Amino acid sequence: MLERIKRIFIGPPLENEALQGEKYGVVWGLPVLASDAISSVAYAVEEILLALVPILGFASYHYMLIICGLILSLLVILVFSYSQTIENYPNGGGAFIVASDNLGKTAGVTAGAALAIDYILTVAVSVSSGVEQLTSAFVSLRPYTVPICVVLVLVLMLGNLRGIRESSRIFGMPTYAFILGIIVMIFAGFIKLRTGYVPDTAVIQSTGTVSTFLLLRAFSNGCSALTGVEAVSNGVPNFREPSVKNAKRVLLLLGILVIITFAGVAVLVNMYHIVPGDSAVIIQLASKIFGRNFAFYYVTATTFIILIIASNTAYSDFPLLMSVMAKSGYVPHQFGMRGDRLSFSNGIVSLSAIAIMLIVIFRARVKALIGLYAIGVFISFTLSQTGMFKKWHKEKSKNWKLKAAVNGIGAMATAVVVVIISMTKFSEGAWAVIIVLPIAVYCMLHIKKHYEDVADQLRINKEQIGQVQFRKDYNNIRVIVPIESVNKASVRALRYAQSISDNIVAFNVSIDEERAEKIKNQYDMLDIDIPLVVQYSPYRKIVEPLLKFIDSEEYNYQEGEIITVILPQFIVTKGWHQILHNRTRVYVEKQLLKYKHIVVATMPYQLKK
């Protein structure tokens, strides 16, 4: 029943070979990876004015334009530098890989943890912001804000669990619709002014004078427009070949679109004298330009949708980032496993669960969540830029001085922004990220140490393989020993199998040919007379290939025979270590115990720490 429901919502499983077809090109990669950055048009200018207008009154618009210019200048630097990151680090991971490669593992883990926190907050903030826009239009829905947010996160989760290609189709069109609406509104706004329209000028009284802290606060609010710029460099593996060229094109288009839409909206807000109030700035602007007609409702609807869809950038990059970090051993290995639809489903589900938790805790209040936002991504910006600067300085390749200069300027600029955000938003919640980030880094480093300890204790070298002694006093029992790799635990299980039977088969399920060949070579070094059977599993199933082998003519199973399946299992010493390892043995044992002719035995190998 559960399997049937899963197939209805997620779809049938895909073979490993279908992965290339699941990837997207420029047309669908742009809306998926640009949605976060593009959506900032809906609120970044408003956030700047919210800081300035209560203090400076009408003078706020002048300073708003200057701040927007500085933000767009920083955007140009980031686009250029991340283009270099894509070219030199095409395997994904972005700031995590760049910082790890050039600044060391602690810096890399810090960048990865900061990005992960930012992606989680992107989902919580984007969904909460979109629902806030909805409930401001339909006041009767306000008591149901949190449930609506939770439902929308679950919808996003299901859409992304359906796979990369389907999710890009589902969530790509609304992004294009929003971009079209904003560009049309910008052109219509300028045309209306040229035809003689004179906007109403609101009387806004100033209550104070301009100060450095006030401008820095407004600047830090507007820097939310730059979140999502790093998404393309993190998601290069999701592009079709040539992946690097496609990713660079998407990054360039992203930069151009953000500049056009962000700058256009900022200028029009200044010329139409839009004052932040009960209604969003962009909705007020649409109302003044179009009136209450179809175009106004189109902009309103697509604005709500883009704020929700903006979180899809996080759904594209967070699971991929976690998979890269999982391969390096800094997060549980389960994050590196692809699901039925070839997406990193564990990352998608975890992102949704944590985002829902934040939405519930903060009651979906955007003002409470926005204080946590942006600092994480700017920390990753700084580490990535610094890493690239060090790379050019160390390699001294062609045009290295120019490249190093760009990354050096980017590193200094983003570092300044980190300090500004930390100062101006500390009391609004930035303190939480500043505390959580070191804790996350500490946990990730300890996860890495645990995996290293496990590998050291399980590793069996060539000399040890040659010294392994296998007993030859057999009893007539049929035995199968499933092995994932050749290590101390699997060798111990094979030795035990020889002590009880002379009819033994070692069995391996492989999901890729390279790993299968590696296991065959390692197994041949054992110089043992137990045959090894390697079965390829295109749908990443484990139990089904084993059962199919037992029923095959190759195994020649006779009805009435009892088969003993010996499962190697290493035993960790601490309870929290268990969540860091796949529970494959438990699943296999549970499935095999359903068959009367199969006896399941576990051969434990106790680790020391």
Image (cartoon, grey):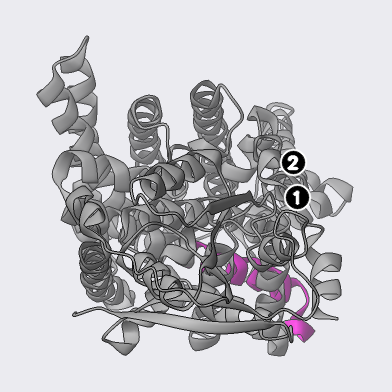
Magenta-colored span: 121-141
Q: For the view shown, which residue lies furthest in the top direction?
A: 398
Q: Which mark is residue 181?
A: 2
Mark 2 burial class by Cα count in 10 Å: few <14, some 14-19, many 20+: many
Q: Is residue 455 above or below residue 562?
A: above
**Total number of numbered discs in the rendering:** 2
Q: Quadrant of the C terminus?
A: bottom left
Disc 1 + disc 2, Cβ < 8 Å: yes
Residue 515 point in image, percent of width and height: 47, 44
Q: Quadrant of residue 369?
A: bottom left
| Foreground pick, 589 / 472 | 472
Residue depicted at x 45% and y 45%: 520
Q: Does residue 36 appear to the left or right of 308 in the view shown? A: left
Is residue 349 visible to the viewer in this orientation of the structure?
yes
Q: Is residue 512 above or below residue 448?
A: above
Is residue 182 visible to the viewer in this orientation of the structure?
no
